[in-house]
């Protein structure tokens, strides 16, 4: 008998984190799920750890690639093994709140027009201390997929990381797009959002872990990530629902230049592709201040949510 939800954990050399991710799935208030772990030929102790989990719960299935096939193909391999009506991707270094599946399912099942669900995300450090908070919405509801694409196209991936969403498996036709290796999540979200609405709750039901290995990798790939952003922008800018104005185009170029500057990826050459360097550096102090203020607000909200959760747990106890 197949499960309603397939929770998929694609992983590579995250043995130090994956136990926490799996336990957060096994602690869900909604029990009708299968847990699929696809190991991309890790060289750490991931396989040994999985042997213990497999023996402990029949809902867990483990697959190991004989060679590293890359992140996008590994995500797609996890999708190929999924049998549930709904799919929840969980990155191996992230965690789910105990009600994540239950709340996400309620949002997508209550409206047949919804093709994608996202929740609030707490950004945490290596020791799960709060460092930030992010959410697409300020209150629970749904919004037209085309509106979400339009907003993200000129901004960033406001929908969130793979661990934050849930979607219908039948609508994920073609899987994750291998032509966007550093933007595979947003490319998939756009594909799903062209088929329906986005449902969202600001409740932080996902813990996105930020740590040195992840941040180092992100810094190293900054240039490639932005190349993917340029290509997806070109692919969607002519869509009839995209509101292309001079101001939005300027702000997009400004954000792109700032991203290159932060990543120090051939910054001088790349900035000139978007804006005259003299204009960019004139605006740079304001960009840095706005960035720092945004991070500070995010951190304050994260601490508030953590305190609220701790208070509720003490009350329940």
Image: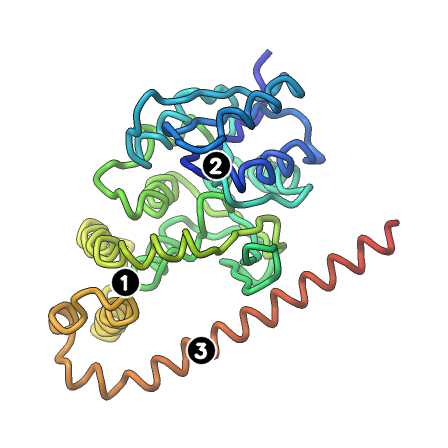
Residue 227: image quadrant is bottom left
Task: Label 3, secondary structure: give it.
Answer: helix
Give the CA distance from mark 1 to mark 2.
Answer: 31 Å
Residue 169: image quadrant is top left
Task: Label 1, secondary structure: give it.
Answer: loop
- Residue 130: horizontal and vertical position, in percent? 60, 62
| Front tag of 1 and 3 | 3
Task: Indicate left or right for 221 with 110 as reference.
Answer: left
Residue 244: image quadrant is bottom left
Q: Mark 3 or mark 2: name the one nearer the start of the chain.
A: 2
Q: Decide: few, some or many residues near mark 3? Use Cα within 10 Å; few <14, some 14-19, many ≥20.
A: few
Task: Indicate left or right for 45 with 58 as reference.
Answer: left
Residue behind mark 2 = 89
Q: Decide: few, some or many residues near mark 1? Use Cα within 10 Å; few <14, some 14-19, many ≥20.
A: some
Residue lying at 56% horizontally and 69% vertically, measured from the top left: 299
Q: Can residue 178 be seen in this view?
A: yes
Give the CA distance from mark 3 to mark 2.
Answer: 30 Å
Residue lying at 48% horizontally and 33% vertically, measured from the top left: 9
Residue behind mark 1 = 243
Work out which residue is located at the far top of the displayed protein and give it: 1
């Amino acid at each position: 008998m197949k499960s309603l939800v397939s929770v998929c954990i694609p992983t590579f050399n995250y043995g130090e984190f994956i136990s926490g991710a799996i336990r957060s799935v096994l602690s869900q208030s909604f029990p009708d799920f299968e847990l699929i772990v696809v190991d991309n030929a890790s060289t750490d102790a991931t396989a040994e750890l999985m042997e213990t989990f497999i023996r402990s719960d029949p809902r867990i299935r483990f697959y190991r690639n004989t060679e590293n096939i890359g992140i996008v193909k590994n995500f797609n391999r996890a999708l190929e093994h999924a049998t549930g009506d709904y799919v929840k991707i969980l990155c191996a270094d992230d965690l789910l709140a105990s009600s994540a599946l239950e709340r996400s399912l309620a949002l997508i099942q209550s409206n047949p027009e919804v093709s994608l669900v996202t929740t609030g995300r707490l950004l945490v450090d290596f020791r799960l201390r709060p460092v930030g908070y992010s959410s697409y919405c300020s209150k629970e509801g749904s919004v037209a997929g085309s509106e979400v694409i339009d907003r993200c196209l000129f901004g960033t991936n406001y929908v969130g990381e793979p661990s934050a969403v849930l979607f219908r498996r039948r609508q994920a036709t073609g899987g994750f797009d291998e032509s966007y290796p550093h933007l595979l999540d947003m490319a998939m979200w756009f594909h799903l959002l062209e088929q329906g609405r986005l449902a969202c709750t600001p409740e932080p039901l996902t813990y996105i872990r930020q740590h040195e290995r992840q941040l180092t990798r992100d810094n190293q790939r900054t240039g490639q990530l932005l190349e993917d952003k340029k290509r997806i922008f070109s692919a969607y800018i002519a869509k009839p629902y995209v509101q292309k104005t001079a101001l939005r185009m300027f702000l997009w170029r400004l954000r792109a230049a700032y991203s290159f500057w932060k990543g120090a990826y051939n910054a001088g050459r790349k900035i000139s592709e978007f804006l005259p360097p003299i204009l960019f550096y004139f605006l740079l102090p304001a960009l840095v201040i706005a960035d720092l203020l945004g991070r500070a607000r995010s951190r304050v909200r994260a601490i508030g949510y953590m305190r609220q959760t701790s208070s509720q747990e003490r009350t329940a106890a």
